[in-house]
Image (cartoon, helix red, strand yellow):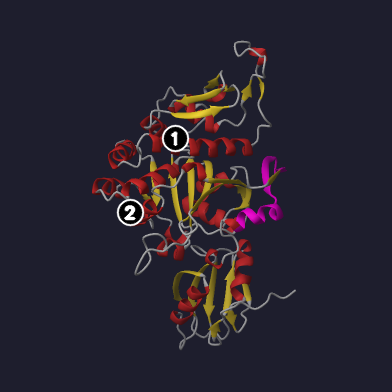
Amino acid sequence: MVLAGLLVFATAAGAAAGLGMVKSQVSQFPRVSVGLSLDWAGASAGLGGAVGGRSSEALNFLLVGIDNAAGIDPDSPIHIDRDANTLLTDSVILVRIDPDADRVAMLSIPRDLWVPIAGKGWSERVNAARGIGGAATLIETVSEYLGVPVHHYAEINFAGFLRIVEAVDGVPVDIAQPIRDDSLGLRIEQSGVITLDPDTALAYVRTRRPLTVPPGGDPATEADWVRLGVWNDLERNQRQQEFMVAMLKRAVEKGIRNPFTLRRVAGELLDHENPSITLDDRITVGQLVDLGDDFRSFPVSQIERFRLPVADAAIDGKQVLLLLEEEAEAVLDFFGAGSLAGVRVRLLNGSRTGTVTGMEADLERAGFSVVDRGNAERFDVARTTVRHTEATAHKAAELARYIDPAPPLEWAAEIEGADVEVVVGADYRAVLEEGRVPAR
């Protein structure tokens, strides 16, 4: 659920104390192979990964809660109308960590956001992307559609969420008014700060159709329960963000920055038949140590919270949310949209006398992310060409502005593991320090 970030944040803080027992546990968490889908330059040169010292570059973590009830008591209401092998994502949050600016921010991505599925040529709700093509497809879908780089990935299932809440003895949450959702087993009849137990906490962050009792009503009277809010994903996103901050505060209060406490929490997530949390295959314990060192005393209350501006729509009989692109521009820019580092490039040598080595170094210096290199299908390519999919045409156009001479753009049905491919031809001369002004 929303607490995939807890382990990233808290493990880093605890690991900074330098105790090997915590590092050993973190190294045992399952990994998912998504390296080529991540922003390669940021993931490899980010915290703990810079050659010759630590980098202070901002990193984006994609934190995902999996709608999966494996390992949970069969009598739990979680199992209602649910397959234990469900691969839908129940929550998607992009967390930006910027050591240089001493800032941490989170952006909720509504599960009903209508997006082009990376590499598929068709669109669907974003919460279906992982089930369609795995974590890599979800990462690429978010990155390509929103134009933001994703440097690292973590996911957690329902069982992991429950275990974390239990490990910190519940989470105090300020409940503004009574809230109820019978389909999830949620019923809180009073307002004020209430410490939520694991089952109640999970239902609270998952509810999309809650009821409430207005002032003067009686929670014991069935007819007094009325609809709370407008029942959309944005309200749930807000509850999830508030809960995540409350959870991190509780974890700090319970001593999560103490390696012994952290070891107990990490053990809860490890010592079960069904793994609770999965990390990407690029992040290292060293990166988490440096992250914790930089944010050891960071006040959780200063975490900034953002939401995407969207509008309701119906497509193919489905109720979905559409991104309001102009209104979203400022938010996405904050999370790195439009940055050259968000363009993942594969270089292919198409000339017998040419080499991609020099171009790779020049592109990296300009700020692009070269994620792969190799040979083209033939070596008699006269003119350098930039290939792209329908979803990455804008990134190809941006890259083309920096290549001399100006290359043509070519459409491709799919580019696996990268946003664009550059077939380097015999005419290639240089990467420009500043891109050409786009034609109007």
Which percent across, then down, holds residue 83? 48, 33
Please, what secondary structure does the residue beneath circle 1 have? helix
Q: Amino acid at mark 2?
A: Val
Q: Quadrant of residue 152?
A: bottom left
Which percent across, then down, holds residue 135? 47, 51
Q: Amino acid at mark 1?
A: Phe
Front one among 143 and 306: 306
The stretch in magenta equals 312-333
Mark 1 neighbour class, 10 Å CA radius: few under 14, some 14 to 19, many 20 or more: many
Q: Quadrant of residue 315?
A: top right
CA distance separating discs 2 and 1: 24 Å
Q: Which residue is mark 1?
A: 158
Front one among 440 and 354: 440
Mark 2 neighbour class, 10 Å CA radius: few under 14, some 14 to 19, many 20 or more: some
Q: Residue at x 63, y 23 (%)?
A: 211
Which percent across, then down, holds residue 186? 53, 23
Q: Is residue 260 left or right of residue 317?
A: left
Q: Which mark is residue 285?
A: 2
Q: Which mark is residue 314?
A: none
